[in-house]
Image: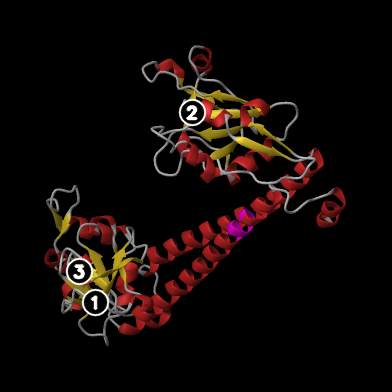
Amino acid sequence: MRKLGNIPATWSVAKLGDIARVTSGGTPSRKEPSYWGGNVPWVSTGLIDFNTIHEVDEYITSNGVDNSSAKVFPKGTVLMAMFGQGVTRGKVARLGMDSAFNQACVAIVPKNGLSQEYLFQYLRHHYNDIRGLSNSGSQANLNAALIKSISVVIPTKEEIREIVHLAKLWDQHIQETTRLLKLKRRLKRGLMQQLLTGRRRFPKFAGQHWKEVRIGEVLSEQFRPVTWDDAATYRLASVRRNSKGLFWREALKGSQIAVKKLHSIRAGDFLMSHIQAAYGAMAIVPTDFDGGHVLDMYTILSPRHSDDFDVRFFGYLAERAEMKHAAYVSSNGFFAERLRLNFDPHDFLRRKIEIPPTLAEQQKIVAVLAAADREINLLEQQLAALREQKKGLMQKLLTGQIRLNGEMSSRERK
């Protein structure tokens, strides 16, 4: 872990193994049916996400506890994931109920009255440093010895109480914003289900029947090949999976690009990745990507007649599972030697969709869904700001740059 720097004289630093018991979990044998399907919650590493665990996917029996390496720990116990794909390793969580957990986790139980909540907040804040321990040498995962070696700053008991109090306040704000964000996303999904299928109509358009068209009847491929220049700089764009929008890859000189086939994209284009289309890698090009470039492994679509079809309506259709499926069935074989389906744009353009018969109704639907997107984006920004603010505050609190005392905290509680 990184150096902890100067801390107040009244504070101390100790190894986690000296101030807490670090105990590995255990998984009852899957071959023994009597160990599973009981009423003892069993936690897997996938549930550990800087959270309090109140629900689990599996339960074990008391027979499984008594006759295997599984151990039950009380509510409030801090767990840390030792293994796990992606970002799981090094994450911590609290148990929201008495639970057992698998061998890829450890329980961290403080000694001598040290606050469990303080350890949770401290380890959570130092997540990136803890992950770094598992990246040294040939060590790919954490283990009990590495976890015990983690250095922990220990403020005075009074300051620990105040730090925990402030951290919980921030967590409450973050949890409430997260809850609102989930609610707004669920509301948008419901609106899409109703509005994009014609199940819910605006009164003005109620008497007009939707029409079935082939995608190629309303959208056509665009080809804007770049005149190559090895000395020119090209800014390359790509599309995230699951209709999550575009992102910039990198800006490269022409001489640095192996495949000398690029196309220009414009705001309002509908962009699809050939090797990722089956996974929903498709989205409308926003204004800040206008003039960017993509490799020729992308399909660029735009409306045949902008006066009777709004490509933004198609952009919302593309967020639904039905469009991802259409891209999947329009993909064939594998691309090169990689296990990725190769998208066939001509087949895709032959697929059928149902659309409102007028541009006015399409635009009305787009306006409602765009308003939902703005609310979601605002909450996402608020949530990111809250998390960043808490991170900065905890950095100062856990190093003593900001000191708390009982008098200050009493005023805050009022």
Q: Dividing the image into 4 quarters, which one contains the C terminus?
A: bottom right
Q: Which residue bears the numbered disc 3? A: 255
Q: Dividing the image into 4 quarters, which one contains the N terminus?
A: top right
Q: Identify whether 238 is placed above or below 29.
A: below
Q: Secondary structure at mark 1?
A: loop
Crowd class of label 3 (few under 14; some 14 to 19; many from 20; radius 10 Å): some
Badge count? 3
Q: How is the image coloured?
A: secondary structure
Task: Identify which amino acid the numbered label 2 is placed on.
Answer: Asn
- Label 3 or label 2, whichever comes before in sequence order: 2
Q: Secondary structure at mark 3?
A: helix
Q: Which residue bears the numbered disc 1? A: 232
Crowd class of label 2 (few under 14; some 14 to 19; many from 20; radius 10 Å): some
Crowd class of label 1 (few under 14; some 14 to 19; many from 20; radius 10 Å): few
Please name the residue shown 37% across and 79% down the image.
Answer: 287
Q: Main secondary structure of the magenta part?
A: helix
Residue 50 in view (yes/no): no
State the separation of the CA atoms marked 1 and 2: 50 Å
Which corner quadrant of the image does residue 221 belong to? bottom left
Please state the horizontal and vertical placement of residue 141, each as a whole percent of the image: 43, 33
Task: Identify which amino acid the numbered label 3 is placed on.
Answer: Ser
Q: Which mark is residue 143?
A: 2
Q: Which mark is residue 148?
A: none
Please state the horizontal and vertical placement of residue 281, each as a whole percent of the image: 29, 61
- Label 3 or label 1, whichever comes before in sequence order: 1
> Start and end of the magenta stretch?
386-391
Q: Looking at the image, do the residues carrying marks 3 and 2 touch, with CB atoms under 8 Å apart?
A: no
State the separation of the CA atoms marked 3 and 2: 46 Å
Please name the residue shown 63% across and 39% down the image.
Answer: 120
Please name the residue shown 17% across and 63% down the image.
Answer: 258
Task: Identify which amino acid the numbered label 1 is placed on.
Answer: Ala
